[in-house]
Amino acid sequence: MNEDSKTIFFAYQGRKSNQADENTDAIKRAIKDFNKYQNTYVAKTWEDYVKTDFISKSVLKAIKDCLIFVADMTHFNHNVMFELGYAIALNKKVLVILNSNIQNATSRYHSSFLKDIKYQSFSNANDINKSLQNKAYNDGWMNSNVKLDTVSPMSKHIFYMESQNPNQASLDLSSYLQMYSEENSLDVISENRSEIQYQTINWYFVNIYQTRITIVHFLGDDIEGHKEVNASNSFWSGIACGFGRDVLLLAPTKYRAPLDYYDIMVQYEDSNHLVDEVEKWLAFKQKEFSDALPVGVASTNAEKELEHEVDLLKLGIGCEIAENEKENLLEYFVPTYSYNKAKDGKSTIIIGRKGSGKSAIFIKLAKEFSNNKKIYLINLKPESDELLHNIDMSLMFKSDSSRLTFFFSVWKCVIFSQLFLDIRNKIKGKEANGVSLSEDEQNIQIFYLKNEDIIGKNFLGVISIINSKYLNSKDLDKPNVLEFLYQHFLNPIKNVLLNYLKNLPNQKYCELIILADNLDKTWNADKDLSIQADMISTLLEIDSKINHELSKIEFKLRSIIFLRKDIFEYLCTTNNEPDKLLIQTHEIDWKQYPEKLRELVENRFRFILDLDDDTNLEDTVWNKFFDITNNDCIDPFKTIERIVTKRPRDLLYFIGRMFESAVNNSRRKVNRDDINYAIGNYLKFLNQNIIAEIKAVFPEVEGILSRLQKYHGEIFEYKTLLQITGVFGYNKERTESFVEQLFDKGYMIGYDDKKRKPFSDLHELKRRLNNKRFLGLLPNKVFVIAHANYYYIKNRIASEESGLDY
């Protein structure tokens, strides 16, 4: 045992300037007393290493060599979070201490993702030393709570924790990593909070452990919520370093990097700088990539048991988000009426709730269309809302009509430039093969060189350039602005395109398809929704405008646009002719073909386990890995289907959490305990979905649902709900509108206290609210249930019997 093996290392937030700090005083006094009255251990702190040239390396070495790691989690300090993650990854004995006298310290810890790591309260040095004497530390917490022995370490390539601020830098980096992974056939797993708000601790551990590289994107200090988000990022960065992975941390310059990870963090000035730095770093690391080793054929009983565990794990660690499994998704994609409608129909608006499979259809169509040489594909990417900070468009237009006219023109710029890029890429391929270019093709190249600053930009990017570079004016509704735009860009690019396209052979067989997904990714209720609504609405009606501009060629043109249902409904309330939109709309509704959901899950099982199409899954999967049937239902899939909303993401998320629990508890099959674990996590997942879907209209939804948590799955009076919403300034009418949304999303249901049965009919609730008792003098007592899904699960009432759409 070396000298440091009996070291106790203390991590805590340092004293700020000359300010008094009771935590620092208590910890330093505890260390002094501890070292004075015993000589078995030596207590040290990070401050013992501040005079070294490489403080971060010295501190990490000290943690690696110590026997016990003590972390003061009172303030969720980023250095401490990083060091805690590092110590946990090394399976150190960890003592978490917390000064419960500090305001909000206890509640913050209990509501954090670390709540399952036990802590000891302290007020003074005696409390700290008592915790050490009682050995109140967490010994091998990771091994006890996360099962990694069946996960193949570094079998995948990159785990990317995306920025929770969807600014242009974040979007451009995501696009770059997607392109990089496709070009180099690499696995990139992304944590995408805009799609799935809640993931379990196990999910992070597994994905960091199974990948070679971890990239974490921090928030700038000027972004709301940055302290909490960056504290979490710091912890997972520490875990990755503790696992010995290559780690790259990214942050805008408006972030004060802690000493612990200053040397592995890149701070960028803008989007281009960020992508350049990541590109250089990955180029240096690329030589270390290698493909995962295949699992061998099991021969001995021990090997067969290991193979069973590995299969169990593999079934649970796939991605619920289509974008994270782009290539694999095509292997188990299930065609539905929605897909066929989008593929073979006319211009279509595909709507659906979060997780209904919009992006999966988009990915499938994009792949098929891109392989068809007769199709020119306009693939519109999500927009960053950060540019709205720089362009106050609400002040730029004197009327709604002038704004709409301008927006239509901007979309023409975007679509023409995307078409232009598609053509130019074809020309570049021709030029690379030594084929001489025609005059029209040369004109394409020349035009690009003159206008590359605007070509390829998205909607807000085009407006930003028009505003700052071309006009430097806030008067975008003046007639000369549109005249300027047409004269200097739209007419020239249209003429170049027409000259090229009209000379194409068999042009009447060619098709121009506008494909748009994730336009609602940055839908932000905190910004002017009328601006955002007009941006999307004008795109939904752009077909006729583009057809008119390109009338001289025989191209067929259509658009396929994917939108979240709640956003589409909001657009209909702001549109003068919503009927025109509704005619083009198709909603993805898995209740119409529930057998397709089973087909999707089983196709996925076949792909993951490498099973033939004709393999009977009853014995190879359902009976082999599931033990969750009961007297009412002997089919494992039906048992799961009763609990979750009929949507692909919900189903895959729930199944993933069941397998996660089974693996962590060393079970050979998923059992009822694993279902209960999955239910707990799934309910949090659903809550976050509802918040995302109705926050645009009801920005206070998160606060209201937080207060309703007290009535989780319980029956309570409607007047209590009125009291809660009243705290947020809601009157009776606004509360009724809010309740309509909660009923529609399945979060809330009514309760008949006489029949002792729940009901999901909103009209029945309204009838009861309007009824009076005692000769019509007193309002009727009306009861509702918050978090209906939990109520049904708790009372074992099948969702199909209730008619609940949740």
Image (cartoon, rainbow, N blue to C red):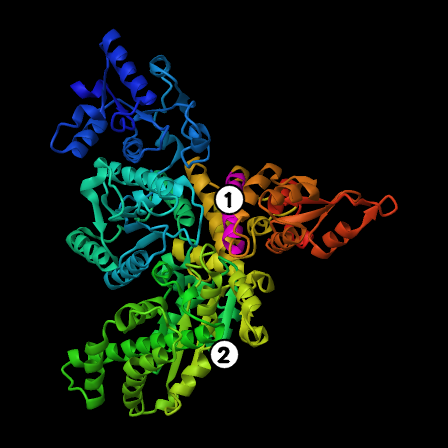
Q: For mark 2, give the secondary structure.
A: loop
Quick one: which residue is furthest to the left in this view? 53
| 524 in magenta | no
Q: Assess whether mark 2 and mark 1 are in contact (beta carbons under 8 angstroms).
A: no
Question: Which residue carries the number 2 mark?
Answer: 345
Question: Which residue carries the number 1 mark?
Answer: 684
Query: Residue 555 placed where, x, y %?
Result: 39, 87
Quick one: which residue is furthest to the top in this view? 37
Q: CA distance from mark 1 to mark 2?
A: 38 Å
Regarding residue 242, the answer to whether it shows in the image is: yes
Query: Residue 75 placed where, x, y %?
Result: 36, 31
Q: For mark 1, give the secondary structure.
A: helix
Q: Nearer the viewer, residue 88 or 664?
A: 88
Q: Nearer the viewer, residue 608 or 15?
A: 15
Q: Residue at point 59% right, 75% down?
A: 579
Per the rendered image, the range of residues in magenta is 674-694
Q: Amino acid at mark 1?
A: Lys
In this view, 602 is above or below 46: below
Q: Nearer the viewer, residue 461 or 245?
A: 461
Judge from the rendering whether residue 175 lies leftward or rightward of residue 318; answer left or right.
Answer: left
Judge from the rendering whether residue 45 lies leftward or rightward of residue 477; answer left or right.
Answer: left
Q: Nearer the viewer, mark 1 or mark 2?
A: 1
Judge from the rendering whether residue 781 lies leftward or rightward of residue 318; answer left or right.
Answer: right
Instruction: Provide the major secondary structure of the magenta segment.
Output: helix
Please tell me in which quadrant of the rendered image residue 261 appears: top left
Q: Amino acid at mark 2?
A: Gly
